[in-house]
Image (cartoon, rainbow, N blue to C red):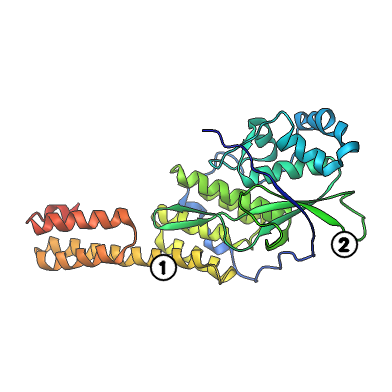
Amino acid sequence: MKHWIVLLTGWLLLGCAAVGPAPPLQTEAVFADALFAPAARPHDGRDLFAATPAMQRYIAEQIEPQVRRKGAQRALLEALYTEGELRLEYDAARTRTAAEAFDARRGNCLSLVLMTAAFAREMGLMVRLQEVLGAPVLEHNGVLTFVVGHVNLALGDGARHGRTGMTEQPWLIVDFLPGQDLARQQRRAIDDRRVAAMFMNNRAAEELAQGRVHEAYWWLRGAHAQDPGFANLYNTLGVVYRHHGAPDRAEQALQLAQALDPGNEHVAGNLAGLRQSARAEAHHRLAVDAATRGDLSLARQHLQQAATATSDSALRSRYAAKLRSLQSGTAASVLQ
């Protein structure tokens, strides 16, 4: 089933609020490169906003002829999303660069922001990239949650540099997530490096969803090189470590995410889930030890506590199955 792009726009006056400096924390220490196979290629984010020759031709042939009549912003958006021939589809499965989204004729919210910004910059428009505050976009993987975030952009009329009165002029807000109230939306300006970190965090989550834990790790390494103050990358890093069987490393990464963003309830939930799983696994190990010694009563107690302690449905089912086997007199299942 095809899902076409829903484009929301509105003219607003914007202030100058931007992402403040990150706390002086030691972020490098949470990475453990030796645990992961080397990346197939570097993840540096240098081509996120690159405009290809095909995109430049599209500007010359489809957008510029409409600028005089419609204005640059409207000519751009209509050529890309409403009246042009691109017929872009919304695709949440993969985060693409600007050029990849243009070539594929599809993208998620961040991909479409990148592509629109690349076109606007190529046309000489002012571009303001913005993180939307409030309820973030989330993805779930088992007991842990990825915080993906929501980004939109504002287009100003005129040159990007050397223009006075930038905050007094109206900006055209462009948002690709349906149901947004642009007039009430809380936003803050972010720079290209923060957007690159968000892009790489998305790619890491996508790789992990496909079971490619090593590749996910290196995307996060790239995100850290772009913006070490981006809290969500450490949340995703905690999920990567958890799936890689390194719970201590996972807790360290999640604690750093919490230190950078203390009010993030999703990071707090991931920490709680991780600690619950650790308690459950500790009871499981005790159950195995008790069964090995022939103390099946104690093994049953620990299996019950393991099943109660975890919020991971797969682990709970595993412990419950072992408990049923043990209650029927089969101790061997506990040792597997």
Whether residue 232 is visible to the viewer of this picture, yes or no, is yes
Which residue type does callout 2 highlight? Glu
Which residue is depicted at the point 15% across and 52% down? 333
Q: Residue at x 73, y 42 (%)?
A: 116
- The residue where tag 1 is placed is 272
Residue 283, quarter of picture: bottom left
Percent from the top left, x then y, of residue 76? 79, 39
Which badge, 1 or 2, is on the more N-terminal residue?
2
Considering the numbered disc 1 on the image, is that residue within a helix, a strand or a loop? Answer: helix
The residue sitting at 43% across, 58% down in the picture is 144
Looking at the picture, tell me which residue is in the foreground, 181 or 305.
Answer: 181
**Relative image position of residue 38 (x, y in whole percent):** 52, 44
- Write down the quadrant of residue 11 in the picture: bottom right
Q: Secondary structure at mark 2?
A: loop
Drawn side of residue 320 relative to residue 129, left or right: left
Which residue position holds label 2?
Answer: 168
Residue 244 circle label: none
Depth order, front residue of 227/28: 227
Give the mark toward the camera: 1 or 2: 2
Q: Residue at x 48, y 68 (%)?
A: 268
Spot the residue most to the left.
329
Residue 55 lies, in percent from the top left, at 76, 32
